[in-house]
Image (tube, rainbow, N blue to C red):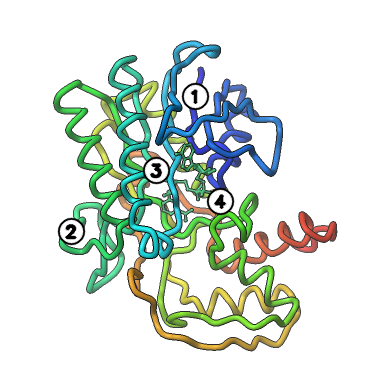
């Protein structure tokens, strides 16, 4: 089997590529940036927003495209709304390739398509156009609609995966500046850190759970398309963790007495999300293995190992 991964130099793309290759699957990566973590994933450097393409040369036809390429920082899309147009354009180009070659596609969507929900856990049918809280969210909603239109007009098989706060190995501050890497960097140095909305509650998903869900979706979409094609599926842990709890877990792993500045929630952000995983369980057999109490210490351990060469302390 051959899998094209767009965004293969990113957090999810890197772990997914390495996992598929370990499973004996051929991987063709496409990204506008070189992979900073590994040179093992065959990668073509292309900007899919401009002239880049998924044209299979020199790899040949793929069995499935996993489309992950995007400017993935939600708050940045508020400062630079043109990121949303870029993300939509990239998805359009990826889908056009899939349409022309008849290649099934798995799309990396986001919990942002749900907007602010009054209660959790959130089922897949709770999507609300009215809830779009940021240009990033609006682009994901538009991407999902475009995929469904391609499925209706061109019989394109697809699965939409809705990720939530994925964290773990192969993430860094200068890429996305996400919360868990920020904590891993600042907490042990006792550097100032403001938590915007400490009681915001999210479903933090350890990278190995996210990758496991995507691998299961690839397998079903290629070998039993009727069982999954046309579905949007949440991945997560099914449990909420507040930002303050996540920060405290890092402080505990670092052996540091936590001290944080507490700020208010920022424009474009939502305050709570927990995934309903019934569909992921029923359609993919997905059972998360990493509650935040297990995954966050592992993420901290990877950070210390990668940046400071420290030996693993937890497993
Ligand atoms: N990580 C999360 O918590 C999370 C949550 C919800 C949704 N998602 C979605 O999952 C996907 C993967 O996320 P990630 O965490 O790996 O993000 P990431 O930022 O680590 O990786 C995205 C990759 O896409 C590449 N890219 C961006 N624009 C491109 C372009 N025009 N042409 C080619 N490559 C381009 C980037 O260079 C980057 O390597 C994204 O679509 C993101 O929106 C991620």
Spatial distance from mark 1 to mark 3, Cα to Cα? Answer: 15 Å
Q: Which mark is residue 128?
A: 2
Marks 4 and 1 close (CB-CB < 8 Å):
no
The local secondary structure at tag 1 comes to strand
Residue at numbered disc 4: 207
Q: Earlier in the sequence, mark 1 or mark 3?
A: 1
Residue 156 percent across, percent down from the top left: 25, 24
* Callout 3: CB less than 8 Å from ligand 1: yes
Q: Earlier in the sequence, mark 3 or mark 2?
A: 3
- Where 267 falls versus 89 (above or below)? below
Residue at numbered disc 3: 108
Residue at numbered disc 1: 3
Residue 200 percent across, percent down from the top left: 41, 77
Residue plotted at (54% across, 63% down): 178
Q: Which mark is residue 112?
A: none
Q: Earlier in the sequence, mark 4 or mark 1?
A: 1
Q: Residue 276, located in which quarter of the rendered image?
A: bottom left
């Amino acid at each position: 089997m051959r899998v094209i991964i767009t965004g293969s130099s990113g957090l999810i793309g890197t772990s997914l590529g390495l996992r598929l290759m370990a499973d004996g699957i051929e991987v063709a990566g496409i990204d506008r940036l070189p992979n900073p973590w590994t040179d093992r994933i065959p990668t073509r450097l292309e900007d899919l927003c401009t002239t880049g393409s998924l044209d299979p040369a020199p790899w040949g036809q793929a069995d499935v495209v996993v489309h992950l390429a995007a400017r993935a920082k939600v708050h940045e899309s508020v400062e630079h709304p043109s990121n949303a147009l870029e993300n939509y354009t990239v998805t359009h180009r990826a889908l056009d390739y899939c349409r022309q070659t008849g290649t099934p596609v798995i799309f990396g969507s986001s919990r942002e398509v749900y907007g602010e929900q009054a209660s959790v856990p959130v089922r897949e049918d709770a999507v609300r156009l009215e809830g779009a809280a940021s240009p990033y969210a609006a682009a994901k909603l538009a991407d999902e609609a475009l995929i469904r239109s391609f499925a209706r007009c061109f019989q394109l098989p697809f699965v939409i995966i809705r990720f939530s706060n994925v964290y773990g190995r192969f993430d860094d501050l200068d890429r996305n500046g996400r919360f868990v890497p920020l904590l891993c960097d600042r907490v042990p140095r006792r550097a100032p850190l403001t938590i915007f909305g400490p009681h915001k509650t999210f479903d933090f998903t350890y990278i190995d759970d996210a990758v496991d869900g995507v691998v299961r979706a690839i397998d079903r979409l290629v070998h039993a398309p009727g069982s999954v094609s046309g579905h949007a599926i949440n991945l997560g842990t099914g449990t909420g963790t507040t930002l303050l709890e996540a920060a405290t877990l890092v402080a505990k792993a670092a052996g540091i007495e936590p001290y944080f500045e507490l700020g208010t929630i920022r424009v474009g952000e939502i305050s709570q999300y927990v995934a309903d995983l019934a569909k992921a369980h029923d359609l993919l057999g997905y059972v998360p293995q990493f509650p935040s109490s297990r995954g966050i210490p592992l993420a901290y351990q990877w950070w210390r190992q990668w940046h400071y060469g420290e030996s693993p302390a937890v497993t």
